[in-house]
Each structure stands twice: as structure tokens, then as C-alpha cells.
Image: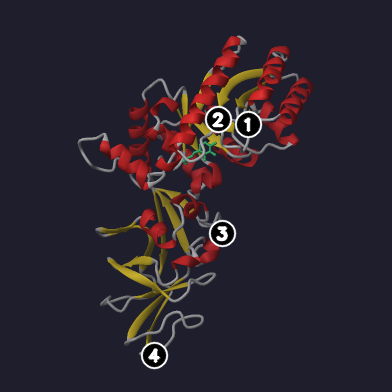
């Protein structure tokens, strides 16, 4: 556990985002909150607890460990869907605990049937079909086999979902590829319907697809980045705004990351600050040291680029970001002392550091930056 910084989850902002999304998609569409990657760095326990009080009752995760983390926090009050990795032992666990999971290849299908038989309990599965991302999913040529399995194993399998994932719906340059994927998905769905196999839930949309291609919303949307108050890309945001009279961002960032000044010192012109020679003081300067570094998830690429809020002013990161510390130019601050609050992401008085500005500097996607936030940093809901 690191006590040198902490992360705050703003429940009011989350409620705003969830309300906005639910209204956008309508009552008939299930909002599944995607909490893989430790809830995009927000922290699974705190985030899902907060999301549950905001009315979310469906969560999607990457693997069984994350599913366990959600289960531990919310027990049987919510539905959980594993979209990615499940080991053989995890299949046992998932079936026993009513956690549904993707089946995207023959091996997993056979394992699932075998284990469900052994447990004498039905597995709730989502059949993922390959539509053009070429990552996971049954090929078109395998669908007849899948259909046969589903029909022959109604005592062990519940065909709850039919799904796919798009290969970059956040960028207009992928438009043709996504359109082709949508059409391939319709073909698969038609195939199953002709086989008299109708899943309860058809789903395909992530945040970007739900905005750029509304027809992909179907019965359930798997929403990650937008619930955290960020857009998948500037293109998606602009696309949304174009359809609106009021040009205002309806989403609010819910995360803040705060630390404090550990030490302050004065340096003279010509002095280098930190390792090497990446920053030289050209005049008398005041430097504050913050006990946060790349080991906590503050990217090294923010060396000489990042900004930190101290005493209501935006201060530049100077020198290289170290493993556990970074240095900030506080020459413009009249007073600054050990213990003053340092905001790495979030607001101080009327100024803010958004994650987007942060990641523009570092050329890192919002996604990557958030998920790098160390698990050991304490999180709290405010
Ligand atoms: C991560 C993920 C999502 C959510 O993506 P966002 O862009 O964050 O909304 C949806 N579906 C799958 C399969 C994913 O892996």
C-alpha cells in the first residue's frame, strides 16, 4: 500500500455518466459496465460498489480473477460476464457461481460441456463470433458445429448471448471494416435463428461503436471508457456533438489522483535538476519534490512535459520522472511548503488537469494511462 498518494472516485460524477448513458441507450438496452484492467485503474472494489449504488447491475470483465473481485464486493446482486481468459479451474468456479463467460473456440466449448456435466449444473455462455477483428471468435465455417453442440447439450448449456467485438470503432478510418463486421454479425445471427437458436442477448457495442454506429447497441452495450467520463477518441466526441444543439460535454471525469509536496529546495542558474542533463535551471528556481513516479503509474514520458496543480497553480514537471519521485517547478508560487496538496489528475480551486491533456502530452491513450495506475494506491469514494 502506498500512502504517498491516493485516488478519489467521485460518485456524483459517476451517477451523472450512468444517467446520461442509460438515457441515451434507452430502457431496453442493458448497460454492462466494463471493469477490466482494475476498472481502468479506478480500482475494482471501490468502482463497482459505487457503480452499483448508481444503478448498474451488469459487469463485464476480462478474466476470472476480476470476476472474483466483483463477486467479492457485490455477491449475487449483479450479473457478471467474463469476456476473455478463463482457465479450466475457473470454468468450474464460473459455472458454480453463475458467472457467464464467452465461448469462442472448440476447446473451450468442449471443456465447458464436460465440466458442466461433472457439476451437473448448466453453464451460461455467450457465443463470440469472428466478424473481422481476427482476435477471438468462432469462424463462419465452425458455426454449424456450434449449433450442433448447442442443440445436443441443452442439459448443460444455456445459450445466453451472441456477441462480437469491433476492431477500432473510434476511428473513422476503420468505417468500412466496421460496416463489414456489422454485416457479418447479422449473417451469423440469421444463421442461428434459422437453426432455431435464439440467444437472450445479442451484443457488440463498446463505447465508440455505441455512438458511431447506434445499430450496434442491440440488447446490451459493453461500456468502459465513457462511464469513467472519457471519450474513446476526439472523433467520437465530435461525432456526438455534431448531433446536438448544445455543444457541451455530458460526461464528467470521476477519478482524481492526489499527492503532496514532500520537500522544497532552491536551485541556482546553471544547475541541473534530477538525473542527467534533461533540465537545467536558467535562473534561480524553486523546486518541489512529489513522491510519485513511474512505478506508481506516472508515465516517464511526462518528464519535462507533465503538469501538477499546487496551491491553485499549474506547475511544470521538470527533469525526468523517477521511479518514486518527480520534480516540479514551483518558482511562481509565493508560498509552497511540505505537505501542500499536489494534484496529478483532477481539480484544485478552478483549474484542472484532465486525463486527456495528460495523455496528449505523453501520446498515451487514456486507456493505457489509467490502467497503469498502481493497484497499491489507496482508493476512496467521495
Ligand atoms: C474493453 C472492451 C469493451 C469496452 O471498451 P470501451 O472502449 O472502453 O467502451 C467492450 N468489449 C470488449 C470485448 C472489450 O474488451
Q: Height in image: 92 above or below 288?
A: above
Residue neighbourhood size for the residue with mark 1, other residues' Cα within 10 Å, grouped as few (<14), some (14–19), many (≥20): many
* Residue at the farthest front position: 176
The label nearer to you, 3 versus 1, is: 1
The image shows residue 123, relative to residue 232, as above or below, that is: above
Give neighbour class at mark 3: few <14, some 14-19, many 20+ (Cα, 10 Å). Answer: few
Q: Please tell me which residue lies in front, 239 or 94.
A: 239
Q: CA distance from mark 1 to mark 4?
A: 59 Å
Reading the image, the residue beneath label 2 is: 164
* Alpha carbon separation for disc pair 3 and 1: 39 Å
Residue to which mark 4 is pinned: 270
Which of label 2 and label 3 is nearer to you? 2
Mark 2 residue crowding within 10 angstroms, few (<14) / some (14–19) / many (20+): many
Residue bearing the label numbered 3: 1
Mark 2 or mark 3, earlier in chain: 3
Q: CA distance from mark 1 to mark 2?
A: 7 Å
Q: Is mark 3 within 8 Å of ligand 1?
A: no
- The answer to the question of whether label 1 and label 2 lie on touching residues, with beta carbons closer than 8 A, is yes
210 or 171: which is nearer to us? 171
Q: Earlier in the sequence, mark 1 or mark 2?
A: 1
Amino acid at each position: 500500500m502506498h500512502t504517498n498518494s491516493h485516488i478519489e472516485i467521485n460518485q456524483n460524477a459517476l451517477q451523472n455518466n450512468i444517467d446520461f448513458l442509460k438515457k441515451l441507450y434507452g430502457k431496453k438496452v442493458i448497460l454492462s459496465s466494463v471493469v477490466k484492467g482494475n476498472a481502468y485503474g479506478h480500482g475494482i472494489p471501490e468502482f463497482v460498489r459505487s457503480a452499483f449504488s448508481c444503478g448498474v447491475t451488469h459487469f463485464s470483465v476480462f478474466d476470472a480473477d476480476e470476476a472474483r473481485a466483483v463477486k467479492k464486493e457485490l455477491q449475487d446482486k449483479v450479473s457478471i460476464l467474463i469476456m476473455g481468459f478463463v482457465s479450466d479451474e475457473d470454468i468450474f468456479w464460473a459455472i458454480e457461481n453463475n458467472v457467464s463467460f464467452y465461448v469462442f473456440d472448440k476447446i473451450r466449448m468442449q471443456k465447458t460441456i464436460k465440466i458442466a456435466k461433472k457439476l451437473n449444473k448448466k453453464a451460461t455462455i455467450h457465443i463470440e463470433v469472428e466478424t473481422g477483428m481476427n482476435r477471438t471468435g468462432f469462424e463462419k465455417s465452425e458455426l454449424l458445429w456450434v449449433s450442433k453442440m448447442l442443440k445436443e447439450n441443452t442439459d448443460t448449456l444455456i445459450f445466453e448471448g451472441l456477441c462480437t467485438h469491433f476492431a477500432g470503432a473510434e476511428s473513422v478510418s476503420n468505417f468500412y471494416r466496421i460496416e463489414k463486421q456489422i454485416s457479418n454479425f447479422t449473417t451469423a445471427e440469421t444463421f442461428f435463428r434459422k437453426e432455431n437458436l435464439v440467444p437472450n442477448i445479442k451484443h457488440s457495442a463498446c463505447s465508440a461503436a455505441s455512438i458511431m454506429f447506434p445499430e450496434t447497441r442491440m440488447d446490451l452495450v459493453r461500456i468502459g471508457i465513457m462511464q469513467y467520463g472519457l471519450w474513446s477518441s476526439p472523433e467520437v466526441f465530435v461525432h456526438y456533438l455534431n448531433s446536438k444543439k448544445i455543444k457541451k460535454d455530458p460526461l464528467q471525469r470521476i477519478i482524481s489522483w492526489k499527492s503532496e509536496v514532500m520537500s522544497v529546495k532552491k536551485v541556482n542558474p546553471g544547475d541541473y535538476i534530477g538525473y542527467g542533463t534533461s533540465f537545467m535551471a536558467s535562473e534561480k528556481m524553486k523546486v518541489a519534490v512529489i513522491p510519485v513516479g513511474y512505478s506508481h503509474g506516472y508515465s516517464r514520458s511526462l518528464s519535462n512535459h507533465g503538469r501538477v496543480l499546487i496551491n491553485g497553480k499549474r506547475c511544470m514537471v521538470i527533469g525526468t520522472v523517477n521511479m518514486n519521485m518527480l520534480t516540479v517547478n514551483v518558482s511562481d508560487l509565493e508560498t509552497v511548503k511540505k505537505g501542500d496538496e499536489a494534484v496529478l489528475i483532477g481539480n484544485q480551486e478552478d483549474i484542472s488537469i484532465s486525463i486527456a491533456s495528460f495523455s496528449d502530452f505523453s501520446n498515451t491513450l487514456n486507456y493505457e494511462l489509467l490502467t497503469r495506475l498502481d493497484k497499491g494506491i489507496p482508493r476512496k469514494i467521495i
